Image (cartoon, rainbow, N blue to C red):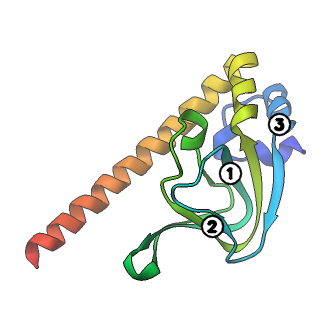
Amino acid sequence: MDISYIKKLNLFQDLNDKELDTVSKLLMIENYPKDHVLFRRGDRGDKLYIISKGAVRISLEIENKKEEALAVLNAGEHFGEMALVDDAPRSADVIIHEDAELLVLSKENFKEISLNHRDIAYKMFWVLLKTISSRLRNSINQTEALIHICMIC
């Protein structure tokens, strides 16, 4: 895989060319059509995904089998990072929103990076930590807004 593209991705922003080359050899490419269900809440998670082209929709199925979209992620963004650090099931559904090309880093390959390339793992962990922190703050803000709305009703 060409490192010139992955060099631009947020997840790999702090890596030098040698480190990018190492990571690029561990990434796989997967293509999916619009409306394909990539995974469901409760599924076993073992991959991190980076959107190369297209978009994905993060959602939850609520009563009556209705989908509630939580976010739409576009090219350059990543998701599924919690699967790299814990063994808990997936926390939401991911549906392909537009035909998509995804770069995939398996948990097994991430473990290889963590064990054999600690500098790379350290840099990637910081970006993942910032992403998870930002998403948690957004969730807290959304929860606060919902509580406020419910108190008004």
Give the residue at x 71% y 18%. 115
Question: Given the image, on which type of amino acid does mark 2 rest?
Answer: Val
Closer to us: 134 or 38: 38
Query: From the viewer's perspective, is 6 left or right of 74?
Result: right
| Residue at disc 1, secondary structure | strand
Depicted 56 relative to depicted 138: above or below: below
Depicted 109 relative to depicted 60: above or below: above
Query: On the image, which quarter does residue 141 sit in?
Result: bottom left
Give the residue at x 52% y 59%. 41
Mark 3, residue position: 26
Query: From the viewer's perspective, is 113 left or right of 4?
Result: left
Give the residue at x 85% y 41%. 3
Mark 1, residue position: 49
Crowding near the residue tagged with mark 1, few <14, some 14–19, many ≥20 C-alpha atoms within 10 Å: many
Give the residue at x 29% y 53%. 140
Residue 111 x %, y %: 69, 27
Q: CA distance from mark 3 to mark 2?
A: 22 Å
Question: Given the image, on which type of amino acid does mark 1 rest?
Answer: Tyr
Circle 1/circle 2 CB separation < 8 Å: yes
Mark 2, residue position: 56
Question: Given the image, on which type of amino acid does mark 3 rest?
Answer: Leu
Query: On the image, which quarter does residue 87 sit in?
Result: top right
**Upstream in sequence: badge 3 or badge 2:** 3
Crowding near the residue tagged with mark 2, few <14, some 14–19, many ≥20 C-alpha atoms within 10 Å: many
Query: From the viewer's perspective, is 79 left or right of 106?
Result: left
| Residue at disc 2, secondary structure | strand
**Upstream in sequence: badge 3 or badge 1:** 3
Depicted 44 relative to depicted 123: above or below: below
Q: CA distance from mark 3 to mark 1?
A: 13 Å
Residue 144 x %, y %: 22, 59
Residue 79 x %, y %: 59, 52
